[in-house]
C-alpha cells in the first residue's frame, strides 16, 4: 500500500492528471473545477508539456493556494515537448490512485459530482475502465460560453452494448468513443499505458487495442467533462492552419493497430479501411484544410457502407 492510499476512507484514491500546453488562459478554470469536486480523496498531478506562455507560473501560484485540498498535488514540467500520449504517461508514472483520469487544461469537469458519478459507475458495473461522456461548449471569449451537444450523441450509446469484436470493427474508420475515461491505474500500466508513437489520436489507438484484446467499452451516460471548443484547440487549429500531424497519426494508427490484424476483418471491413486510408492520404496531400477535405471526399464514395455509417455516427 503506497503512502497516499486511503486505507481509512471508504473511497479509493482518485488521481486526476491534467495535461497542459500553452493554456494559461484556461488552466485555472480547469483546476477550480477539480477543487470543487465532492469526491474525496483526490490526487492532482499537472503535467506541463513545455509551455511557452505563463501556464507554469499560474499553476504554481494556484497550487500554493490550494494544495491543502488534495491528498497530494504535484506539478511536472517536461524538459521537452512530448505530445499528448507522452504527457499522459508522465502523469501515469507518478500516479498513486486506484483510479485515474486524464483531462486537458482547457477543459473542465462538468459539475461537482463528476468524479463521484464516475467511481460509482465503474464500481457498480465491476469494470476495469469505462469511457466518459462530454458536453461540448463554444468559448466565444470574455466569459461568453454556449453549451452544445453531448458527445457521443444518444444514437451512438447503443454501440457501447456491442461485443468487443463488433466494437473493434465499428472503430476501423471512425473513433466514436470519447477520449476521456476512468480506468484502474494498474490495469492501464499492464497494457503499457498510452502509445507514445502518437502525439495525437492516442485515444483511437487505445480503443482499438482494448477492443481487439477482448475488452468491451462501456460508457457513463451522465456528462463528466465540459469540452471547450476554441480556435486554438488541437482539432480546430489543425484544420484552420492546415497542420497534418493529427491526420498522419491516424494513418499510423491504421498501420499499427488495424493492418496487421486483417484476420479479424471481413473483406468488407478491409475495403472500408483501405478507402479511409486513401482518403487520409489525399487529405494530407491537399493540405489538411477544409478545402482539402472537399477535394479528398470523393474517395469515400468508393465505400457506401462507410457513408451510411457516417450518417449514423
Image (tube, grey):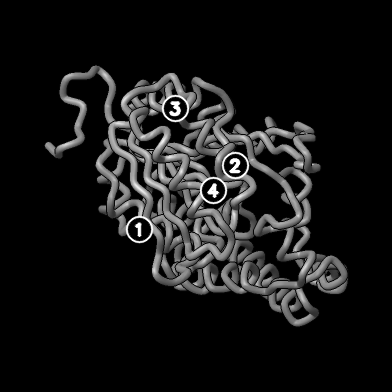
Element assignment for label 4: strand
Q: Nearer the viewer, residue 50 or 295?
A: 50
Residue, far bottom: 285
Q: Above or below — where is 19 with respect to 260?
A: above
Element assignment for label 3: helix
Q: Is residue 177 visible?
A: no
Q: Nearer the viewer, residue 5 or 220?
A: 5
Element assignment for label 2: loop
Q: Quadrant of the C terminus?
A: top right
Left/right placement of residue 254 relative to residue 185 reads right
Element assignment for label 1: helix
Count of numbered tags: 4
- Residue drawn at (47%, 69%), measured in percent from left and top? 81
Give the percent coordinates (x, y) of residue 14.
34, 33
Give the percent coordinates (x, y) of residue 166.
52, 47
Q: In which quarter of the image is the N terminus?
A: top left
Q: Can residue 147 be seen in this view?
A: yes
Tell me, yes or no, whether the two marked residues, 4 and 2, touch with CB atoms within 8 Å.
Answer: yes
Image mark for residue 115:
3
Report which residue position mark 1 lands on: 90
Label 4 vs label 3: CA separation? 16 Å
Label 2 vs label 3: CA separation? 15 Å
- Residue drawn at (62%, 45%), measured in percent from left and top? 26
- Residue drawn at (75%, 42%), measured in percent from left and top? 139
Give the percent coordinates (x, y) of residue 260.
45, 72
Q: Tell me which numbered mark, 1 or 2, is placed earlier along the sequence.
A: 1
Q: Tell me which numbered mark, 2 or 3, is placed earlier along the sequence.
A: 2
Q: Residues within 10 Å of mark 4 (few under 14, many from 20)?
A: many
Q: Tell me which numbered mark, 1 or 3, is placed earlier along the sequence.
A: 1
Report which residue position mark 4 lands on: 104
- Residue drawn at (66%, 38%), measured in percent from left and top? 151
Amino acid at each position: 500500500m503506497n503512502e497516499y492510499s486511503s486505507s481509512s476512507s471508504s473511497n479509493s484514491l482518485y488521481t486526476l492528471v491534467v495535461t497542459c500546453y500553452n493554456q494559461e488562459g484556461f488552466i485555472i478554470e480547469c483546476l477550480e473545477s477539480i477543487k470543487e469536486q465532492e469526491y474525496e480523496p483526490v490526487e492532482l498531478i499537472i503535467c506541463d508539456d513545455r509551455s511557452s506562455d505563463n501556464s507554469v507560473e499560474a499553476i504554481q501560484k494556484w497550487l500554493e493556494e490550494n494544495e491543502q485540498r488534495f491528498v497530494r498535488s504535484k506539478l511536472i514540467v517536461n524538459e521537452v515537448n512530448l505530445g499528448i500520449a507522452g504527457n499522459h504517461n508522465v502523469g501515469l508514472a507518478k500516479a498513486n490512485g486506484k483510479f485515474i483520469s486524464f483531462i486537458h487544461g482547457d477543459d473542465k469537469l462538468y459539475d461537482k459530482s463528476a468524479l463521484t458519478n464516475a467511481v460509482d459507475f465503474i464500481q457498480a458495473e465491476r469494470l476495469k475502465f469505462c469511457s466518459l461522456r462530454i458536453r461540448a461548449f463554444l468559448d466565444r471569449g470574455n466569459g461568453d460560453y454556449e453549451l452544445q451537444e453531448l458527445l457521443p450523441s444518444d444514437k451512438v450509446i447503443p454501440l457501447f452494448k456491442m461485443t468487443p469484436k463488433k466494437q473493434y470493427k465499428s472503430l476501423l474508420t471512425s473513433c466514436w468513443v470519447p477520449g476521456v475515461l476512468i480506468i484502474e491505474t494498474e490495469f492501464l500500466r499492464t497494457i503499457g499505458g498510452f502509445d507514445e508513437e502518437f502525439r495525437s489520436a492516442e485515444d483511437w489507438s487505445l480503443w482499438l487495442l482494448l477492443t481487439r484484446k477482448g475488452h468491451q467499452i462501456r460508457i457513463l451516460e451522465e456528462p463528466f467533462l465540459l469540452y471547450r471548443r476554441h480556435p486554438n484547440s488541437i482539432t480546430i487549429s489543425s484544420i484552420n492552419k492546415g497542420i497534418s500531424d493529427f491526420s498522419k497519426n491516424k494513418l499510423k494508427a491504421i498501420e499499427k493497430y488495424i493492418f496487421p490484424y486483417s484476420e479479424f476483418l471481413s473483406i468488407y471491413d478491409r475495403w472500408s479501411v483501405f478507402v479511409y486510408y486513401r482518403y487520409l492520404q489525399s487529405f494530407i496531400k491537399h493540405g489538411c484544410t477544409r478545402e482539402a477535405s472537399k477535394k479528398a471526399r470523393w474517395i469515400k464514395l468508393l465505400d457506401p457502407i462507410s457513408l451510411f455509417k457516417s450518417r449514423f455516427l
